[in-house]
Image (cartoon, grey):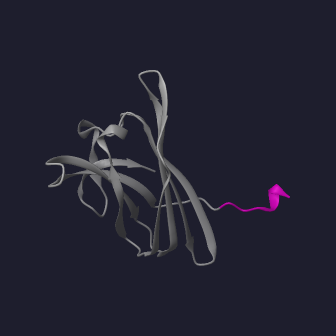
Amino acid sequence: MKKDIIIPEVENVFLAAVQEWSDDFMEKVWYAYLVNDSDFNLDSVMVVSKAFGTIDGEMKKTSILRHAFVEVPSVSVVKIELVEKSLLPLNNEFMVTFFIGNTLYDKKFIFKANSLDENKTEEVPILFVEGIMVK
Protein backbone atom coordinates (compact mmCIF):
# COMPACT_ATOMS: atom_id res chain seq x y z
CA MET A 1 0.00 0.00 0.00
CA LYS A 2 2.76 2.46 0.91
CA LYS A 3 4.37 1.92 -2.50
CA ASP A 4 1.19 3.25 -4.12
CA ILE A 5 1.45 6.63 -2.40
CA ILE A 6 3.30 9.18 -4.50
CA ILE A 7 4.97 11.91 -2.46
CA PRO A 8 6.01 14.73 -4.80
CA GLU A 9 9.31 16.51 -4.17
CA VAL A 10 9.19 20.21 -3.35
CA GLU A 11 11.32 22.21 -5.80
CA ASN A 12 12.10 25.94 -5.96
CA VAL A 13 10.23 26.64 -2.73
CA PHE A 14 12.36 27.39 0.32
CA LEU A 15 12.68 29.47 3.46
CA ALA A 16 14.97 32.42 4.06
CA ALA A 17 15.79 34.32 7.22
CA VAL A 18 16.63 37.97 6.65
CA GLN A 19 17.79 40.60 9.11
CA GLU A 20 15.80 43.84 9.07
CA TRP A 21 15.76 46.93 11.24
CA SER A 22 12.94 46.99 13.77
CA ASP A 23 11.76 50.30 15.22
CA ASP A 24 9.97 48.34 17.95
CA PHE A 25 13.16 46.65 19.19
CA MET A 26 15.55 49.41 18.01
CA GLU A 27 17.89 46.79 16.52
CA LYS A 28 18.19 44.37 13.62
CA VAL A 29 15.97 41.31 13.99
CA TRP A 30 15.54 38.15 11.93
CA TYR A 31 12.37 37.51 9.91
CA ALA A 32 11.47 34.22 8.22
CA TYR A 33 10.21 34.39 4.63
CA LEU A 34 8.65 31.78 2.38
CA VAL A 35 10.20 32.09 -1.08
CA ASN A 36 8.35 30.72 -4.11
CA ASP A 37 10.93 30.67 -6.92
CA SER A 38 8.80 28.32 -9.03
CA ASP A 39 6.62 28.94 -12.08
CA PHE A 40 3.49 27.89 -10.16
CA ASN A 41 1.19 29.62 -7.67
CA LEU A 42 1.07 27.95 -4.26
CA ASP A 43 -2.51 27.59 -3.04
CA SER A 44 -3.86 27.09 0.50
CA VAL A 45 -0.44 27.48 2.10
CA MET A 46 -0.11 26.48 5.74
CA VAL A 47 3.08 27.13 7.73
CA VAL A 48 3.47 25.61 11.19
CA SER A 49 6.47 26.77 13.19
CA LYS A 50 8.11 25.87 16.47
CA ALA A 51 11.51 26.01 18.11
CA PHE A 52 13.18 23.32 20.21
CA GLY A 53 16.56 22.42 21.65
CA THR A 54 18.76 22.59 24.71
CA ILE A 55 19.94 25.74 26.49
CA ASP A 56 22.27 25.41 29.49
CA GLY A 57 21.53 21.67 29.67
CA GLU A 58 17.78 22.23 29.87
CA MET A 59 15.39 21.10 27.13
CA LYS A 60 13.36 24.01 25.76
CA LYS A 61 10.50 24.18 23.27
CA THR A 62 8.13 26.90 22.16
CA SER A 63 4.45 27.00 21.42
CA ILE A 64 3.37 26.02 17.92
CA LEU A 65 2.45 28.92 15.65
CA ARG A 66 0.30 28.52 12.54
CA HIS A 67 0.16 30.85 9.53
CA ALA A 68 -2.15 30.52 6.53
CA PHE A 69 -1.86 32.17 3.12
CA VAL A 70 -4.60 31.79 0.51
CA GLU A 71 -2.08 32.05 -2.33
CA VAL A 72 1.61 32.70 -2.83
CA PRO A 73 2.07 33.79 -6.47
CA SER A 74 4.90 32.37 -8.57
CA VAL A 75 8.26 34.11 -8.18
CA SER A 76 7.29 35.92 -4.98
CA VAL A 77 7.88 35.94 -1.23
CA VAL A 78 5.72 36.25 1.89
CA LYS A 79 6.89 37.23 5.35
CA ILE A 80 6.04 34.50 7.83
CA GLU A 81 7.15 35.70 11.25
CA LEU A 82 9.76 37.30 13.46
CA VAL A 83 12.38 34.92 14.82
CA GLU A 84 12.84 36.19 18.37
CA LYS A 85 16.46 36.70 19.49
CA SER A 86 16.02 34.29 22.42
CA LEU A 87 15.13 31.52 19.92
CA LEU A 88 18.39 31.75 17.93
CA PRO A 89 20.15 29.12 20.12
CA LEU A 90 17.31 26.69 19.32
CA ASN A 91 16.38 24.74 16.17
CA ASN A 92 13.64 26.72 14.40
CA GLU A 93 11.40 24.37 12.42
CA PHE A 94 8.89 25.38 9.76
CA MET A 95 6.54 22.78 8.27
CA VAL A 96 5.16 24.10 4.97
CA THR A 97 2.15 22.51 3.25
CA PHE A 98 0.57 23.75 0.02
CA PHE A 99 -1.24 22.78 -3.16
CA ILE A 100 -0.09 23.19 -6.74
CA GLY A 101 -3.19 22.35 -8.74
CA ASN A 102 -4.71 19.27 -7.08
CA THR A 103 -1.40 17.96 -5.73
CA LEU A 104 -0.51 18.38 -2.06
CA TYR A 105 3.12 19.21 -1.23
CA ASP A 106 4.72 19.13 2.18
CA LYS A 107 8.23 19.95 3.42
CA LYS A 108 9.97 20.56 6.73
CA PHE A 109 12.60 23.33 6.86
CA ILE A 110 14.89 23.73 9.87
CA PHE A 111 17.17 26.61 10.74
CA LYS A 112 19.66 24.75 12.96
CA ALA A 113 20.58 26.17 16.36
CA ASN A 114 22.81 29.25 16.08
CA SER A 115 22.75 29.11 12.26
CA LEU A 116 21.18 32.56 11.95
CA ASP A 117 24.40 34.55 11.88
CA GLU A 118 24.91 37.70 9.81
CA ASN A 119 28.42 36.45 8.91
CA LYS A 120 26.96 33.39 7.11
CA THR A 121 24.57 35.19 4.78
CA GLU A 122 24.20 34.93 1.01
CA GLU A 123 21.95 36.72 -1.46
CA VAL A 124 18.36 35.47 -1.35
CA PRO A 125 16.72 35.14 -4.79
CA ILE A 126 13.69 37.39 -5.46
CA LEU A 127 14.32 39.43 -2.27
CA PHE A 128 17.83 40.43 -3.44
CA VAL A 129 19.02 40.97 0.12
CA GLU A 130 21.47 39.05 2.28
CA GLY A 131 20.01 36.20 4.32
CA ILE A 132 20.24 32.56 5.38
CA MET A 133 18.40 30.00 3.23
CA VAL A 134 17.23 26.47 3.96
CA LYS A 135 16.13 24.37 1.02
Q: Position of residue 17 (x, y in %)?
A: 33, 50
Q: Position of residue 52 (x, y in %)?
A: 48, 38
What residue is drawn where x is 36% and y is 66%? 78
Q: Which residues are magenta?
A: 1-7
Q: Nearer the viewer, residue 16 or 60?
A: 60
Give the vertical position of 135 relative to 96 (above or below): above
Left or right? Give the position of 29 relative to 39.
left
Q: Nearer the viewer, residue 116 or 61?
A: 61
Left or right? Give the position of 80 relative to 120.
right
Task: Please tell me whether residue 110 belongs to the stretch shown in magenta.
Answer: no
Give the vertical position of 60 relative to 22 (above or below): above
Q: Position of residue 84 (x, y in %)?
A: 32, 45
What residue is drawn where x is 46% and y is 61%? 13
Determine which quarter of the picture holds residue 4: bottom right
What residue is drawn where x is 37% and y is 40%? 87
Q: Nearer the viewer, residue 34 or 92?
A: 92
